[in-house]
Image (cartoon, grey):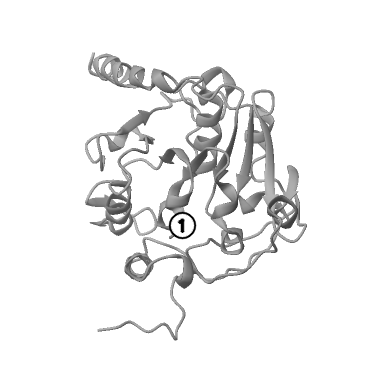
Amino acid sequence: MKNFLLNGLLRSVLKKNKTFKNSFSDQTCYIFGNGASLKYIDFNHFIDYPTIGINHLILHKDFHLLDTCCYTLPEPMSFYNYFKNPYKLEYEKNIMGNLFRSQIIKFPKIPLFTSFTNMFGSPNKNTYYLHHFGKRKPDLNYLDICSEFSYLAGGLYAGIGLAINFGFKRAILVGCDYLMKPKTYGHFYSLPKQGQDEGNNPYEKLLDNCSSKINLEILTINNSSSWLSCIDYETFSGSPPQYKENTEIINKDNLLVLNKAYEMGQHLDPILPKDFIIEA
């Protein structure tokens, strides 16, 4: 009975998402990830189509330039002041959750989509909720923002799932570097990171599942290859890529918070270089 009542209440909440269904029918969008390739690009070249923003993107200094139609942070239980650290399995102050809250409230007009488990920690009223109802693997039969939404395994999953529900027919992926060949590691907000490419497409099942619903392309740097059809940044923008450090594209206060999260083991990637000067 308890689960029945909970599901009934939740489904009434999800019905509010209906206003977004097919709201961008047959249009093109950008889906911005968090990869290190964002250090090379100028956001001014991406204002012609609506953007779906993912995870840490809101920390980028130029985020405000994008025409963001929605933002998604699908991680469960991520907006509360305290949480269970997934790496240490201990309850502690939620450094990253509080940082996201502080940034999201600066953009109250941008709809936020997140897990229903964040319902009592939402940073603003313009928040909409998603749930998989046990359908955890990407499945087009359960891809409804008003009901079972199976694309919740991560930011890219949620971004693509939202794009399909919004009616977009084409999406250009920007900063989705795990789809590069060879696989590119690191994020725009952290120090450079090296890794070994296993030669496998980490999103093979996702891309196979959604291919009949949306045409996906990916922006690459310096003519890199990818598991998807590629668009080279210089050809796309008419400008050569120009590298910037994370300290140039994220404000100092946010860098310090990110670094604190790293020091507490809530974040795996090192943030600040050893010679970074912290003013008193």
| Mark 1: secondary structure | loop
Question: Is residue 93 something that shows in the picture?
Answer: yes
- Visible residue check, residue 175: no
All told, the count of numbered labels is 1
Q: Residue at x 23, y 41 (%)?
A: 121
| Crowdedness near tag 1: few (<14), some (14–19) or many (≥20) residues, C-alpha within 10 Å | some
How far from the left and from the top, in percent, is residue 53? 48, 44
Position of residue 146 in the picture relative to residue 198 (left or right): left
Task: Judge whether 268 appears above or below 81 on screen.
Answer: below
Relative to 132, residue 252 above or below: below
User: Which quadrant is the C terminus positioned in?
Assistant: bottom left
Tell me the residue at 26%/18% (across/down). Answer: 9
Looking at the picture, tell me which residue is in the foreground, 32 or 97: 32
Q: Is residue 145 left or right of residue 48?
A: left
Which image quadrant for residue 113?
top left
Q: Residue at x 64, y 65 (%)?
A: 195
Q: Position of residue 158 (x, y in %)?
A: 49, 36
99 left or right of 163? left
Q: Residue at x 62, y 44 (%)?
A: 173
Please say if 104 is above or below 90: above
Give, as a three-letter code, the residue at label 1.
Answer: Asp
Report which residue position mark 1 lands on: 62
